[in-house]
Image (cartoon, rainbow, N blue to C red):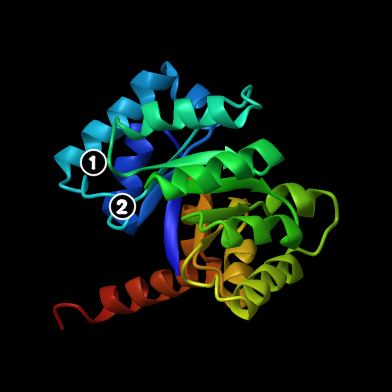
Amino acid sequence: MKFYLDSAKIDEIKEAYNTFGIDGITTNPKHIMASGKPFLTAISDIADWLKEEGLDKGPEVFPVSVEINPHLDNAAEMMAEAKKISKISPNFVIKIPCTAAGVEAARKLEKEGIRTNLTLVFSPSQALWAGKNNSFFVSPFIGWKEDNGEDCAKYIKDVVDIYKNYGFYGKTKIICAAIRTPKQIAECAVAGADIVTAGLAVYKNEIAHPYTNQGVGIFCDAWDHTAGN
């Protein structure tokens, strides 16, 4: 399973890449806002960082999902903006909401060689459309559903099983999005998702464990009693 960082902050991206070896980035309008930069500045800074790291080889190497203007509800307008954004970096994958217009735009963009990420997916039946139309990614959301008491482990397993049934698995890659806890990451891995995307704080929590800290303390004490003897 691959790990993407859900952020548009360059300092977080650098830390996550250097510490955890993240495999890609996902952004959305909220992350752009949190970066404190205008939209074009924020994504251009990410494109510059990709060049600095020698990662600007396209989405197969290091994908960066960038969302179009969410106000757009017409397929032609969605496609026009997607084409402008995709020219900024070969790594950019265009995030498009799972609406009728979004599905149309994503299908046509993929035929033109522009990679898409069908996002804001909240049901297995919605996820079918991304696979059917060859989107590069599909992004089923986890956290929002669990906040409302839904069983997301089964939700992701159903998406994986459907994709395996119809040959979509591995072609349209499943990114589990809106991940908020280490438990959710583990559940997505068990279900067979291709990718999880989460904030830096979630990854730091995932790798932390009180027993690890306790064990380090015990071993430090033992070391101090034996070192130099």
Query: From this viewpoint, is residue 29 visible?
Result: no
Callout 2 touching callout 1 (CB < 8 Å): yes
The image quarter containing residue 188 is: bottom right
Image coordinates for residue 199, horizontal then vertical, percent: 50, 46
Image coordinates for residue 43, horizontal then vertical, percent: 36, 28
Is 80 rendered above or below residue 157? Answer: above
Whole-Å distance between the Cαs marked 2 and 1? 8 Å
State the residue in front, 29 or 131: 131
State the residue in front, 178 or 135: 135
Q: Residue at x 74, y 47 (%)?
A: 144
- Residue receiving disc 2: 62
The image quarter containing residue 8 is: top left
Image coordinates for residue 211, horizontal then vertical, percent: 52, 72
Density class for disc 1 (Cα within 10 Å; few <14, some 14-19, many ≥20) is: some
Q: Can you say which quadrant of the picture contains the N terminus? A: bottom left
Is 95 rendered above or below residue 137? Answer: above
Type of residue at label 1? Leu
Is 69 rendered above or below residue 223? Answer: above
Q: Residue at x 57, y 55 (%)?
A: 138
Going by the picture, which residue comes out furthest to the top? 38
Q: Which mark is residue 50?
A: 1
Secondary structure under tag 1 reads helix
Q: Residue at x 73, y 52 (%)?
A: 122
Secondary structure under tag 2 reads loop
On screen, residue 85 versus residue 57, left or right, reads right
Query: From this viewpoint, is residue 212 visible?
Result: yes
State the residue in front, 48 or 173: 173
State the residue in front, 224 or 8: 8
The image quarter containing residue 189 is: bottom right
